[in-house]
Amino acid sequence: MPQKKRHIHWQLLLQIAFTAGVLFWLLHNTDWQLLGRRFAELQPWWFIAAMLSYAMNLSVSALRWRIILHAMERSAPMLWLLRLNWVGAYFNQVLPGAVSGDVIRAWYTRHQTHSMPLALAAVFGDRFMGMGALIAIAGVAFLIAGTRVGLLPQMGWTIGALAIAYVTIVILILSPFLNFLEKISGKLGEKLHDIRLGMRALLRHRLALGGTVALSFIIQLFSVLTFWLLAHALGESPDAVAIWVVWPVISLFLALPISFAGWGLREGLMVFYLGYLHMGHDQALALSLLLGFTMVLTSLPGALLWLGLHRHHQAPPEMQAS
């Protein structure tokens, strides 16, 4: 246990160092007066609309989560899942890593699934279907955009690699050739068995799979809409490639646990890619910072909703420690 804690501490320090380093570099090369002026001229109605769009994203994804649980022959009250979705969204914004809130969601639904691995499988399925929709949106937009997307360095290879990785994971879940992994003795074998069982149940349940795919596209359209609304809140009219290719790809990269809650990584990628689409450093940085602030502010009710969860279930170990 002490060795595991040391590993977590080192991972946290590296994430903080990465985030601080990228943000310092970006802000060091920023015109502070121009950046401040952009925020001072923020158009409030566009900003409020963006917050409502992100709130719809969180709300609809709770329905997708419930359908996934149904495919696994498990159930949970819709209001309970909606509450946990907001709690998870909040902790994804304020805790290290990219999936801290997802672990918390799984922890609080382990009683409904009668298994922590199955609860993790349901949450993983929820996140996994969303990623698939993002790859599809970026891929189709990339093919339609033609020469416009050629401005982005190696974007075709990036989307292709993401698509191959996604298909590989699906094959690993469904393939019977990996059943030997489930025969590993001890808790690891049991967890692998339950996680693969849960994901296979979703991928083989046609009605649930169709429903989650449709909802995933709706959810990601709300994500794209949030990006578009915030750009207009800052008085920007971003290129269609930025809306349909760059933002979905950046959203996928934010799942990597290399920065603190995505900060720094999102800003660095935004400035890098949007610079090729003729958006200035300060413009792209302002948009990225506003995106992060919007997600934190909109998910803040999750903090209040989490306070009462102790009456229902014990908090996860990592939350108890805090």
Image (spheres, helix red, strand yellow):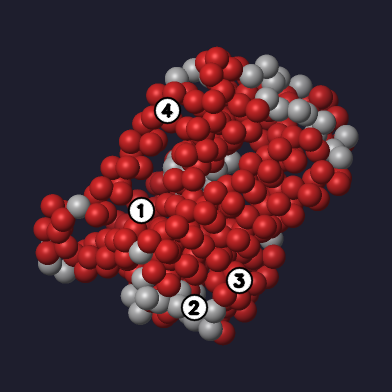
Report which quarter residue 256 is drawn in. Answer: top left
Residue under label 4: 158
Side of 65 relative to 113 (left or right): right
Task: Inspect the image, locate mark 1, and give the three-letter code of the amino acid beneath it.
Answer: Arg
| Residue 58 appears anywhere in the view | yes
**Residue located at (43% from left, 64% from top):** 208
How far apart marks 3 and 1 lie (CA) works out to: 32 Å
Relative vertical location of residue 115 with respect to residue 262 in this rendering, above or below: below
Q: CA distance from mark 4 to mark 1?
A: 33 Å
Residue 154, given in percent of the width and then of the height, sits at 45, 20
Q: Foreground mark, 4 or 3? A: 4
Q: Circle 3 sits on which residue? A: 83
Residue plotted at (81% across, 24% down): 34
Task: Name the kind of residue labelled 4 in the image.
Answer: Thr
**Which numbered disc flags the more N-terminal residue, 1 or 2?**
1
Looking at the image, tell me whether mark 4 or mark 1 is earlier in sequence order: 1
Q: Does label 4 or label 3 sit earlier along the sequence?
A: 3
Circle 2: element type: loop
Looking at the rendering, which quadrant does residue 301 occupy?
bottom right
Q: Are marks 1 and 2 in contact (CB under 8 Å)?
A: no
Determine the residue located farthest toward the bottom in the rendered image: 311
Around disc 2, counting alpha carbons within 10 Å, would you say few (fewer than 14), some (14 to 19), or many (20 or more)?
A: some
Residue behind mark 1: 6
| Residue at image mark 2 | 76
Q: Label 1 crowding class (10 Å Cα cut-off): few <14, some 14-19, many 20+?
A: few
Question: Nearer the viewer's eye, disc 2 or disc 3?
Answer: 2
Residue 40 point in image, percent of width and height = 87, 36
Badge 2 amino acid: Ala
Q: Secondary structure at mark 1?
A: helix
Which image quadrant: the N terminus?
bottom left
Q: Position of residue 35 (x, y in %)?
A: 78, 28
